[in-house]
Image: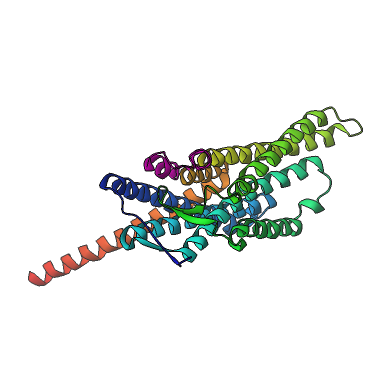
Amino acid sequence: MGSYQTVNSVSLSILINIIIKCIIESLVCFCTIVLNILIITSLLGIKRLRTTQHFLLINVSFACIFFSLSCIISISLTISTLYSKTINSYICQLIGFIVISSCHCLMFSYTLVTFIRFLTIIYPFNKKITSIQYIKIYLIIKWILAFILPGISLILPNQQIIFQPKARLCTISQQSPILFISFCTGYIIPLILISSMNLITYINVACSRQKLGLSQTKLTRLNKRKRRNLRLLRQFSLFTIIFLFGWTPFILIEVIDKEEKLSDIFYLYTLILPSICILIDSSVILHWNKTIYQQIQLWKQILLRKTEIINDERDYHVTTHEITLMSRNS
């Protein structure tokens, strides 16, 4: 098989839709990257925010940035095919692998947060399994799995990742069995794990309220900590549902429309949903975490104040210069 694949020309209406889709998705990805950089900077810049919970938030923010960057790379490839009418098969496989890996990385990040909250609630007195050292190990395993599982499509003899002309995207072929495996490892299995851990957690929190053998003070403190972790668990469950909602339409089209009878518009605009959902997730993280939000607002006020000072100094120098000129003219 040749290293280059010919891409057919598109009609004017489809071309306009491709351009609109690329512009919208690029803007959404850019906003997501900026927002998550602010979140990471806030968490790293304040010492009291360097906790286990915020360490996991940093990992989620990095995963969101990685996903947004992979979408921008994919958009760049789409634009280049409009001009060159050809695409390098190896580059297509690499970019498809990066996009799929970023999706796995994000889903695994949500699953990891749920897992850590689950351990904190089920084993409240075992601090070791939820310590920073153990979380670093979990993160290393997560990132390795996020790249190894999609990498299966690269080592198989037949080319599994191809350029889909309707979606204008490098992804797994609709006829490939790897499509179902990728769907399971990246979406179904994490969703089942998150749902199961949530169910067990709810039952545990409900039972702990009547737990015998503890003093009233310890029981109150334990229930308060569990309710806080349960709230975090609900939040990241919501993030997972939003992210799955973003990818489900495109995946359903990939599975159902194997003969590619649907219009190109369905493929194009369903691909915007994942990026929008990630932006929503990042905004919700910022909205729910009041400390990060207040820190960003403080930076904004400082920046505006510095701008005002600079403007006042410039106006002062201009006024002084004008007065000097007037004096000289007199």
Determine the residue positioned at 61% across, 55% down. Answer: 59
Q: Position of residue 3 (x, y in %)?
A: 46, 67
Q: How is the image coloured?
A: rainbow
Give the quadrant of the C terminus.
bottom left
* Residue 1, placed above or below residue 127: below
Determine the residue positioned at 58% across, 48% down. Answer: 179
* Residue 201, placed above or below residue 33: above
Asked if residue 301 shows in the view, the reply is no
Q: Residue 316's quadrant in the figure?
A: bottom left
In the image, the segment drawn in magenta is: 249-273
Asked if residue 150 shows in the view, the reply is yes
Which secondary structure is most common in the magenta stretch? helix
Q: Position of residue 273 (x, y in %)?
A: 46, 42
Q: Position of residue 318 (x, y in %)?
A: 21, 64
Q: Work out which residue is located at the far bottom of the displayed protein and give it.
A: 328
- Please say whether residue 15 is one of the residues in the magenta stretch: no
Q: Position of residue 129 (x, y in %)?
A: 80, 52
Q: Looking at the image, which is closer to me, 257 or 67?
A: 257
* Residue 13, placed above or below residue 145: above
Number of marks in the rendered image: 0
Left or right placement of residue 215 versus residue 314 in this view: right
Q: Work out which residue is located at the far left of the displayed protein and give it.
A: 330
Q: Work out which residue is located at the far right of the displayed protein and give it.
A: 213
- Please say whether residue 272 is one of the residues in the magenta stretch: yes
